[in-house]
Amino acid sequence: MKIFKLLTACFLMFLPISVFAQDVDYSAPKTYVIGGIKVKGIKYLSEEQILSVTGLTKGDKITIPSVELSDILKRVWAQRYFSDAGFFIDSLSANKDTVFLGLHLAERPRVSRWNFTGIRSGQRSDLIERTKLKRGSELSDYVIESSTGIIKKYFHEKGFLKCNVKVIQEEDEVIQNAVKVTFEIDRGPRVKIGRINFNGNTRLTDRRLMKSMKHTRDKRLMNFFKSKKFKQKEYAEDKNSLIAAFNEQGYRDARIVRDSIYYLEDNRLAIDFFIEEGDRYYFRDISWTGNSIYSADQLNSVLKIKKGDIYDVVTMDKRLNGDPKMSDPDVKKMYTDNGYLFFNIMPVEKTIQNDSVDVEMRIYEGKPATFNKVIINGNNITAERIARRAVFTKPGYLFSQTDFERSIRELSSIGHFNPEAFQTPAGYSIVPDQNKNTVDIAYNLEEKPDSHIELSGGWGGNTFVGTLGVNFNNFAVKRIFKKGAWRPVPLGDGQNLALRFQTSGTYYTQMSASFAEPWLLGNKPVSLSVSTYFSRQTNSNYFYRRSDQFMEVYGLSASLGNRLSWPDNYFVLFHSLSWQTYKLQKWYYNFLFDTGKSHNFSYTIGLQRNSTDQPIFPRGGSDFSVTLQLTPPYSLFRGHKDYKNMPSNEKYKWIEYHKWQFKGDVYMRVVDNLVFRAAANWGYLGYYKKSLGYSPFEGFEVGGDGMSGYNTYGSDIIALRGYPNYSLTPMKNGAYVGHVYDKFTLELRYPLLLQPSSTIFALVFLEGGNCWADIGGFNPFEIKRSAGVGVRLLLPMVGLMGVDWGYGFDPVPNEQKRRGGSQFHFVIGQQF
């Protein structure tokens, strides 16, 4: 009878767990004072943890049976730690108004080991990371089901649509109440799309429809380089893109009547689309409402849609709300660049008559918003002011979309932060407050190593050559004497310090040092760079020592750069002064004279406009520069001199020339991360006096990998792949005489890995250029052509490295029967 009453009470109160006691009438609920609670059956969890979940303490009142007790048990059960749970009344007080409860629990078994079979070790690591499975965690049906779903989804993304997962549980013979769980994975065949059929399309070709879908492609030739894997998520997106292709051509009523997916064979899918195109429509009248800042004529000039144009709602939306792939202005950016962050526009089809559509643009302008908080996160090494001075979004300023985008570009370009982090929404956050007409913005920085070290040694020319170099790109001069700053060097102020020493003992020694401060005046973008160098070469080696024969080259330079506000703030004007001295004594090896000095004092002025979005792998923007380097015209002050018979040490005691250079690079995103680069370079070395002629110093040497190596006369080394080093440079009397050059490059680049620890991208290129001895023979179309492929690798401690294979199609000068042919080039640093 008591059991019957118990079951009846549990049924009536919907208790998930039974409550037992003697001398309790469950058909008549009664309120008790809790005299104590004892938790039994637990091993891994503490009694305090369980009681905190129940919310019950000694002295509380509880009605038995009751909905309250049922809810408590539900909370305990919801923890998913237990396979069984129940409240028991251990005893009652003498007057039966106080109850002593027991909470009996049966903990779920713990997993002592998770195993995966049927897959590779790399896939096993991926699955452990995705499932978040840990040893010692509890086992439940939920864990099994969710983990199985994650495993199947993982392999579905890789094209294994028939993946099957079997879960095997084994009791652990060593650990009590523990099990070993094994996921037996049968990936099955990799399923790809074999054929896509379009039915009902008469106005758009199958090829056009296929191109509209980014991820769903079949085996036809046009998709040779595309993935053929079927992904459910991307398939839904591609169906929308398919309809958008019709919408772009004016077919506003186009729809997919039905689509079917079926297997052609075990590893091949087929997809059939049945499409209803509908009629083509055209724009008729376009009206604007709600606009007070800009007139209808101003808005129409941006929209660029006229009466009678095809009713292309896709392009209309891009011109209204913007498109990252379009450089043209859009209506939304017109407003957001002037603070109207809360601007909204809704095109409404006002009238549809026959094949014509009247559209009304309903605008909500709102009030201008200002920046409230500008937050910098993630700068653990770099000082906050270094990041803050790079951003154009200042508290109190009007919101501007262009200023925000420029800030992202500047933070990506200074080199201290991972530029790829800004390519996702996680790199920043914008929090508007429409009630206050303000916006908070946070830049979530991800610092990356940007200092390099060079340590090398080798044997050559009967001597050992050792090199030690360091380049600190985030140096902090002010922290040199600060305690604890040397870890290993003071960092954080965005300055650059580079030191390099190379020697082979008495034969050759070279030292250089440079320092750069990008913001010399604190809050103004004026940069200062200083450098100095010294090299000494003697007629000595390991077996023969002769120190009275030597050649020394030493010099220093200083430059100032100032960012301009006109024509826009991408322009930088820079000035530089440099001094270089060549000192020779009894040096009879490949120089103009054997004893004497030559001095090269020059002034350089340059104008640069760099709008690329990042320095290593730009996806957009351009970089143009024009420079003029010139020395005083000493020959004009000397009067008439017989330079033809003048000794070289007197003739070139003071080096004179004027040197003009132009460099231009343009980057455009083709699709996703595929980037197109076009570049053009030109240089000319001129003279002041015809009788003196061209300077043998500061010329151009064209061809090869662009690695400078040791350059006696300070010439610019111009890379042109597919040809041997310097092979395109004219020669006279055994010396290079390149005074004019041009170079053109077309590249396609695609990233293989974009991480702070390393960046890898592949490229294919077409290149052409040439070098001439005299400006009179310059012909920009007389170029040496080449093509090839390459790869670049950026390692934080080493810098940018790469290898290119190029094939030169044209003969090289002085070897007319020999073409450039197949050439491998190794690259260190950024080549131009």
Image (spheres, rainbow, N blue to C red):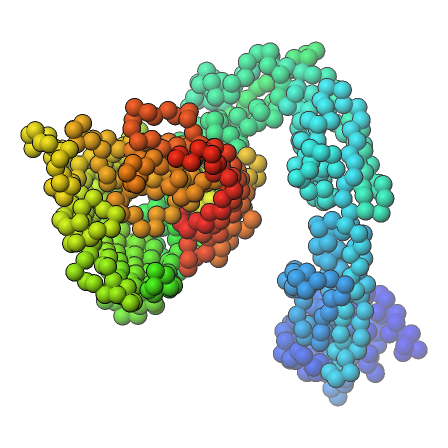
The residue nearer to you, when weighing 621 against 105, is 621
The residue nearer to you, when weighing 292 against 679, is 679
Residue drawn 23% across the image and 59% down it: 538
- Drawn side of residue 645 relative to residue 185, left or right: left
Quadrant into which the C terminus falls: top left
- Drawn side of residue 687 relative to residue 145, left or right: left
Residue 300 visible here = yes
**In the rendering, at what x and y percent does residue 719 appear?**
40, 41
The residue nearer to you, when weighing 1 against 641, is 641
Residue drawn 49% across the image and 18% down it: 300
Quadrant of residue 143 in the image? bottom right
All told, the count of numbered labels is 0
Residue 407 visible here = no
The residue nearer to you, when weighing 325 against 219, is 219
Position of residue 743 relative to residue 445, above or below, is: above
Residue drawn 73% across the image and 26% down it: 206
Position of residue 224 relative to residue 459, above or below, is: above
**In the rendering, at what x and y percent does residue 821 appear?**
51, 39
Residue drawn 72% across the image and 70% down it: 114
**In the rendering, at what x and y percent does residue 454 appear?**
37, 60
